[in-house]
Image: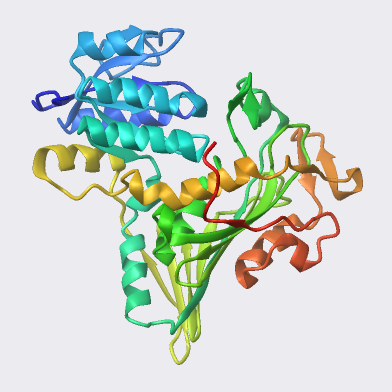
Amino acid sequence: MSTRALDMPLPVVLAGARGHGRWHLQNIRRLQDKGLVRLAGICELTPLTDEELDGLGSPEQSADFASLLDSTGAAIAVICTPIPTHTDLALIAAGKGVHLLLEKPPAPSYAEFRRMADGVAAAGIVCQIGFQSLGSHAVPAIRELIAQGVVGTVAGVGGAGAWARDEAYYRRAPWAGRRRLNGVDVVDGALTNPLAHAVATALALDGATRAEDITAIETELLRANAIESDDTSCVRVTTARGRRVTVAATLCAERPDEPYVLVHGSSGRITFWYKQDRVLVQRSGHGPQEIEYGRTDLLENLVAHLTDGAELLVTPESTGAFMKVVEAIRQAPDPLALPVEAWDLIPEENRRVVHGIDGLVAAAADTLALYSELGASWAVPGEALSNEVSTR
C-alpha cells in the first residue's frame, strides 16, 4: 500500500502514552519544538488530561487505533503498548501506509516477530525498533575498534544488568511479570524487557544481529518474586563466528548499578555503559581510555530517514538475533523459584534481594559463564537450543 504524504512537521500518533509512554511524550514534545513532528493523536483507553498534555497542543484522542490513524492522517505511529499487542497494531499501521517506531521487545515470540516484519516489508513502510541504546554513537565506534584489532582477537561479549524492582512493579499491569496471559504469549522477563537492551547491545557489538547469526542459545531462568516470569536470569548465545555472548541480569540487586556490556579481547577489553554512552578501553601497553559519545534519537532518525534518506538505525531484521533469544526464553521451562534462603525482603523498599547476585552478574559478564558454572547452588543448567528454534 502507498504511504502517507510527508509534509513537515510529520503528524505522529502515540499508542500507549502512560508508563514508559510518558518518555515518548517528552521526546515528541522535544521534536515538536524543533519543528520535525506534530503530535496529532493519542491512543489510550483513558484520555490524557490537559496537565499530561502540557506543551503538546490538543491532539485527537481515541481508544480506536485504526480510526485515529485515519482521522489524523498520521505519517508515523509510535507503539508503546503491552508486548502481546505489538504485532497486530504494527500491521494495522502498515496496512494504512503509516511508518512505525515500535517499542522493544518487538514481539513475544519469533512467529509473531516474523508476522510483523514480513507484513511491514510487504506493505512497504518503514519500521524502527525502539532499542534506544543502538542509537548510541559508541556502537559503531566500538565495532571499528574491534575491526582495527585494538583489543586483539575477540573471544566474546559479556553483559551485566543488576537492577532493582519493587513488588509494585509486578502489579502495574495485568501482563507484568507474566509469561502468558489468557493463553497468549507475553514473555515479560528480565532479559526480554527491562534489560533487553543489554542483550541487543551485546549482540550488536559482536556483529550478530540477524537471526541467522545465532547457532545455539543456553538459558538459566529463575525468580525470587512471586511471578510467572524470570527476575534473575542469564543467557549464553553461540554465534556463527564461534564467539560467545553471555548476558546476566537481575531485578533483585543488592546495590543497583548501571548496566554494561563488555568486549573480551586477547589483549584488552572494552566496557560500554550503554545508558550513559560511556566507553572504557583497556589494552596491553596503554593506559585506560574513557570516552563519552553522543546518541541519535530513534524517532528523530526515523524522521531523517523518511525526509532525507538517512540510514535507519534499528530495522526489524537487525533485531532477529535478539528475537531468537526471546524465542529460546519463551520455549524454556518456566523459571525456577529460588529457595527462600536465597533471598531477603527489604521491607522499607518492598523489594526482594538475592544474596550475592551482584557479584554473580558481574562474574558472568567477566567470564562468559552461566550462573550454574559459577557455583550458584540454586542454578540449574538449561539445555542448549539450536538455531532451528520452533516458531510455534
Q: Is residue 375 visible?
A: yes
Query: Relative to 145, is 390 above or below?
Result: above
Residue found farthest to the right: 341
Residue at the spot x=77%, y=62% of the render?
A: 372
Q: Quadrant of residue 94?
A: top left
Please give left or right for residue 20 compared with residue 296 in the image.
right
Please give left or right for residue 346 compared with residue 55 in the image.
right
Q: Is residue 274 visible?
A: no
Residue at the spot x=49%, y=82% of the render?
A: 268
Q: Quadrant of the C terminus?
A: top right
Q: Could you say where residue 285 lies in the image, as x and y percent from the top left?
A: 45, 92
The number of discs equals: 0
Q: Could you say where residue 248 lies in the image, as x and y percent from the top left?
A: 63, 56
Q: Quadrant of residue 227?
A: top right
Q: Could you say where residue 82 lies in the image, as x and y percent from the top left?
A: 50, 25
Relative depth, front residue between 216 and 277: 216
Q: Could you say where residue 191 lies in the image, as x and y percent from the top left?
A: 58, 46
Q: Quadrant of the N terminus?
A: top left
Residue found farthest to the bottom: 285
Query: Relative to 316, is 383 above or below?
Result: below
